[in-house]
Image (tube, helix red, strand yellow):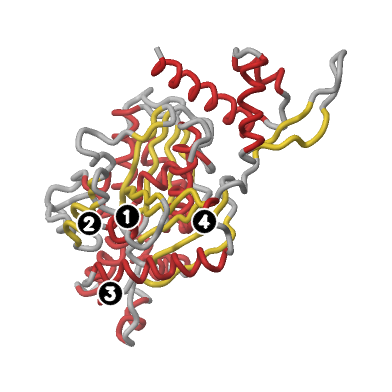
């Protein structure tokens, strides 16, 4: 019975804190009415939250016949979170409050020579994290924790990278490295799942019931959120959308298979395909740039496409066609409410958005996904780091406002 009372008390706190956060300023009587709770229960909970400085009284509301009621609002800067995005091109670190407002942001490039020594590289990430925390001058008790987004297959219990094709890392104990350095809760999450939670909590998919979020960047990954919960799968490895095979005789993927979506449609694949076709004699305005020692990446290919380079345009269109076919398959399989495309390659959406939408429409089953909304992410380059903040925020709410 005591156990059930504890669960009920936490659930009531979750309902109240989330209502104040999403519907505030709001008064206690309105909370009680909407939540189906008694006024004394709401008063007890809100008194506790006020003492803990999670909510505050901001004045009186309009009278409905009696005394004017006190209005309550959520205090978004009661706690702070450090979000880290360990990306293949850059590491991005932010300090944010619970409203996703970024106070400090720093980044540094992910260099090939550095990632060959994972532990040394991660100590560099930890050093910069420490710099940010010290620069903030925020007392220790107001940090929820440090969230780390990392591409690859993860062991969530031990906080270990089982395998990351992007980094060629195996069995790297990230959480342990950070826990030895910091007195805060450390959370490790797959990059794609973190990005999805960010867009669900703060971005393009707020208030939706089911989300399929695609991270379209150097690689391609995805995550599924259903009723606010990430779907992990049996072994926590769900969302490897980029490793669906779409071209059986296609190029070799970093995962070891041929013809993965990531091997034909990702930013890395777009750059590789352009260089391969130039080596086979096709012309591009990027040839001279390459001959002068310039490194061709997806950003350069999109720039060339914008300048009218036919080969760059053809390479992008082919990549987007495979992506559209794969998304059509997702619609047929999952019928989500919202599909969000986020990640670095979405910066070039002006070159492909119409074609992508047409391809999805052409390849999905007739009448399937009639109401699905295909959107682009809004959180920008710090989306994964913000998503790690969202992971903490949702855990905080789930626990009834307990950090």
Q: CA distance from mark 4 to mark 3?
A: 30 Å
Query: Which comes before the other along the chain, label 4 or label 3?
Result: 3
Q: Please tell me how crowded label 4 is: few (under 14), some (14-19), or many (20+) other residues with Cα within 10 Å.
A: few
Per the image, the residue denoted by label 1 is 150
Q: Which mark is residue 114?
A: 3
Q: Which mark is residue 13?
A: none
**Which of label 4 and label 3 is nearer to you?**
4
Q: CA distance from mark 1 to mark 4?
A: 25 Å
The secondary element bearing badge 2 is classed as strand
Q: CA distance from mark 2 to mark 1?
A: 8 Å
Q: Position of residue 79 (x, y in %)?
A: 56, 48
Examine the image and state in which quarter residue 125 appears: bottom left
Q: Position of residue 337 (x, y in %)?
A: 44, 29
Picture layout, residue 376 above or below residue 273 = above
Per the image, the residue denoted by label 4 is 140
Q: CA distance from mark 4 to mark 2?
A: 32 Å
Circle 2/circle 3 CB separation < 8 Å: no
Query: Which comes before the other along the chain, label 1 or label 4?
Result: 4
The secondary element bearing badge 1 is classed as strand
Q: Which mark is residue 164?
A: 2
């Amino acid at each position: 019975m005591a156990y059930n009372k504890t669960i009920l008390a936490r659930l009531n706190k979750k309902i109240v804190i989330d209502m104040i956060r999403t519907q505030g300023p709001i008064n206690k009587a309105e909370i009680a009415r909407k939540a189906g709770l008694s006024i004394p229960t709401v008063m007890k909970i809100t008194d506790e939250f006020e003492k803990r400085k999670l909510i505050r009284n901001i004045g009186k509301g309009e009278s409905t016949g009696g005394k004017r009621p006190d209005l309550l609002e959520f205090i978004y800067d009661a706690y702070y979170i450090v979000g880290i995005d360990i990306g293949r091109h850059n590491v991005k670190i932010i300090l944010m409050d619970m409203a996703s407002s970024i106070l400090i942001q720093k980044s540094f490039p992910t260099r090939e020579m550095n990632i060959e020594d994972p532990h040394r590289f991660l100590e560099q990430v930890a050093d910069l994290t420490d710099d940010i925390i010290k620069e903030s001058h925020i007392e220790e008790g107001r940090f929820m924790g440090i969230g780390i987004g990392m591409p690859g297959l993860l062991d969530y219990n031990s906080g270990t990278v089982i395998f990351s094709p992007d980094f060629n890392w195996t069995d790297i104990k990230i959480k342990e490295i950070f826990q030895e350095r910091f007195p805060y809760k450390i959370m490790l999450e797959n990059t794609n799942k973190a990005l999805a939670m960010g867009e669900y909590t703060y971005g393009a998919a707020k208030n939706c019931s089911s989300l399929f979020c695609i991270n379209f960047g150097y690689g391609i990954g995805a995550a599924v959120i259903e009723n606010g919960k990430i779907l992990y799968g049996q072994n926590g490895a769900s969302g490897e959308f980029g490793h669906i095979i779409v071209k059986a005789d296609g190029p070799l993927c970093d995962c070891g298979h041929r013809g993965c979506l990531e091997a034909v449609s990702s930013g890395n694949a777009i750059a590789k395909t352009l260089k391969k076709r130039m080596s086979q004699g096709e012309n591009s305005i990027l040839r001279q740039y390459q001959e002068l020692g310039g490194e061709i990446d997806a950003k350069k290919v999109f720039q060339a496409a914008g300048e009218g380079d036919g080969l760059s345009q053809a390479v992008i269109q082919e990549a987007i066609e495979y992506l559209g076919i794969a998304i059509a398959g997702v619609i047929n399989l999952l019928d989500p409410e919202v599909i969000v495309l986020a990640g670095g390659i979405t910066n070039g959406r002006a070159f492909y958005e119409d074609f992508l939408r047409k391809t999805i429409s052409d390849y999905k089953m007739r009448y399937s996904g009639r109401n699905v909304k295909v959107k682009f992410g809004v959180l920008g380059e710090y989306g994964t780091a913000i998503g790690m903040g969202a992971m903490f925020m949702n855990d905080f709410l789930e626990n009834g406002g307990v950090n």
